[in-house]
Image (tube, rainbow, N blue to C red):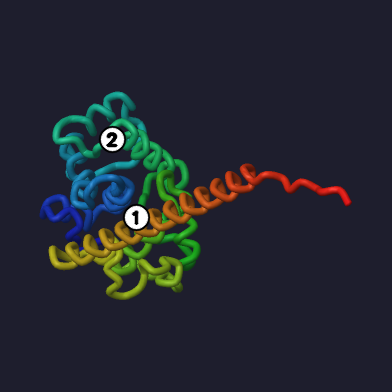
Amino acid sequence: MEATIHLAQQPEADELLGRSPLAALIGMLLDQQIPMEWAFTGPYTVAQRLGTDDLDAAEIAAYDPDAFTELLRERPAVHRYPASMAKRVQELCRFLVDEYGGDASAVWTEAADGADLLARLKALPGFGEQKAQIFLALLGKQYGVRPEGWREAAGAYGEKDSYRSAADITGPESLARVRAYKQEKKAAARAAKATQTARTLKATKTAKTAKSTKSTKSPRKRTGS
């Protein structure tokens, strides 16, 4: 696997992502709750601190958990939550050792088609539906991994020039477009939530008013004939 990558926006870190399947997977795993560049620089930082020019799943899987956590916590930290992410990285590497003999690339090179690849990615520790689809799209768009049906399996992230995720970032301009898309999506989600909250409060207030009105009405007295 050799590709020209610009996800970390740092030459050395991007070079590692371009040639190391495990680095690409770990970068994708780290890409949550922190800026994307920070996440994808993580694999290179880990490799440096391990004193190697590449990452080895078996080595990371067998690393002392406390020591590995400290390795990620060392400043600058690899992630905002180094302890939890150290655990996830080791879980991912143990899975790769157990299921693929430590060969991260086997996750996609052995896939029968796009649907099978998506299922394999979703089975990885720390990879849910969305993360799996984004990584599948990244493999297809930037690494040349294109089994039959890969775009369909990647969903909207597989669309050409969609600028929705890391899969579409090839430089500063595309990074800005993806970031703008995410900000618009978050703003829309906030607006929808605010609208729903307002409707709920209005309905609750209406129901309380109706109940109050009903309870204060005096019963009509029956008059005798």
- Looking at the rendered structure, the secondary structure element under dot 2 is loop
Residue 106, can we see it?
no
Nearer the observer: mark 1 or 2; the answer is 1
Q: What residue do we see at 34% from left, 39% from top? A: 89
Viewer-proximal residue among 47 and 159: 159
| Residue found farthest to the right | 225
Disc assigned to residue 190: 1
* Type of the residue with mark 2: Tyr
Using the image, determine if residue 116 lies above or below residue 65.
below
Q: What residue do we see at 20% from left, 40% from top? A: 47
Residue 15, percent from left and from top: 16, 55
| Residue found farthest to the left | 11
Residue 109, percent from left and from top: 40, 61
Disc assigned to residue 136: none
Using the image, determine if residue 199 lies above or below residue 74.
below
Viewer-proximal residue among 207 and 89: 207
**Residue occupied by mark 2:** 81
Local crowd at mark 2 within 10 Å, few (<14), some, or many (≥20)?
A: some
Res 18 quadrant in image? bottom left
| Left or right: 115, with 1 as reference point | right
Q: Looking at the image, tell me whether mark 1 or mark 2 is earlier in sequence order.
A: 2
* Type of the residue with mark 1: Arg
Residue 174, percent from left and from top: 19, 67
| Left or right: 130, with 144 as reference point | right
